[in-house]
Image (tube, rainbow, N blue to C red):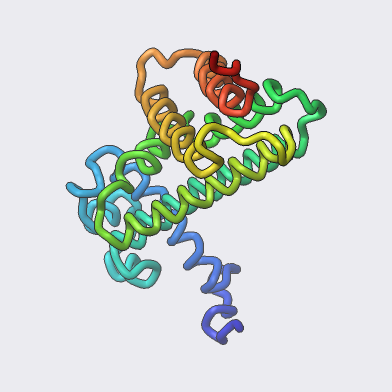
Amino acid sequence: MSTPDSTRNYGGRSVADRRADRRARFLDAALTVFADKSYANSTISDVCAEAGLSRRQFYEAFAGREEVLVALYDDIQRDAGAAIASAYAAAITDDLWERASTVMTAYVRSIGTDARRAKIAFVEIVGVNAQVEQHRLAQRKTWGTVFETLLGQLVGPDVRPPGGYETSATAFIGAVNGLVHQWSITEPRPPVTDLVEVLSTILVALVSERPTAR
């Protein structure tokens, strides 16, 4: 429910719009600061200076630095999930390799093309404290569900990856995180198609028929 203050206009813009704009500026500033200086070595003052806003305005938007980090992480994960869902829905083939390639390309372009986003997603979020770590692991579980759902739709309910979906998803997510982060910081950066080919190969192998042991 809107309050009178939130709907009041100043210079043609509501208070709510101004607050949303400042919040976005703080997030963009934190993305740069946390990536350049690391989360552990940065301060709220650093974020405010980068944003060109005051500490008072910061605390109107966030409770503290940790909340900014988690908000950044969630935005990055949400964008990647939306990119994958859109790419999967738009694919016009049921071929497993082509679908895998399409989905992996969408993911890499969403997270990996901006090295700052990759660093937040794969480095700065890790080991902050028990609460943030629990949040990160919950997000990894969500990605595991995405992994199972998308693959299940392609290969059917009778195909079981090695160790089951949870184990295979954990292994694949670990590979994705490591490879995409390494790719994002490599100079000169290899073509995205090279990275996608590796990730697609791993993904397809997890649900491909394996030779029977003799």
| Residue at screen point 24% across, 43% down | 38
Work out whether residue 136 or residue 66 is closer to the camera in this orientation and state it.
136
Residue 20 appears left or right of 123: right
Work out whether residue 169 or residue 100 is closer to the camera in this orientation and state it.
169
Note whether 31 is above or below 54 in the view shown: above
Note whether 47 is above or below 101 in the view shown: below
| Residue at screen point 49% across, 60% down | 21
Note whether 4 is above or below 81 in the view shown: below
Q: Where is residue 68 in the image (x, y as percent from the top left)?
A: 36, 58
Residue 70 figure quarter: bottom left
Q: Position of residue 97 (x, y in %)?
A: 68, 21
Q: Residue placed farthest to the bottom in the image? A: 4
Figure quadrant of the N terminus = bottom right
| Residue at screen point 49% across, 51% down | 141
Q: Residue placed farthest to the left in the image? A: 41
Q: Where is residue 67 in the image (x, y as percent from the top left)?
A: 35, 62
Residue 183 appears left or right of 81: left
| Residue at screen point 35% across, 52% down | 51
Note whether 100 is above or below 53 in the view shown: above
Q: Where is residue 114 in the image (x, y as percent from the top left)?
A: 45, 32
Residue 147 figure quarter: top right
Q: Residue placed farthest to the right in the image? A: 92
Total marks drawn?
0
Figure quadrant of the C terminus = top right
Residue 29 appears left or right of 138: left
Residue 179 figure quarter: top left
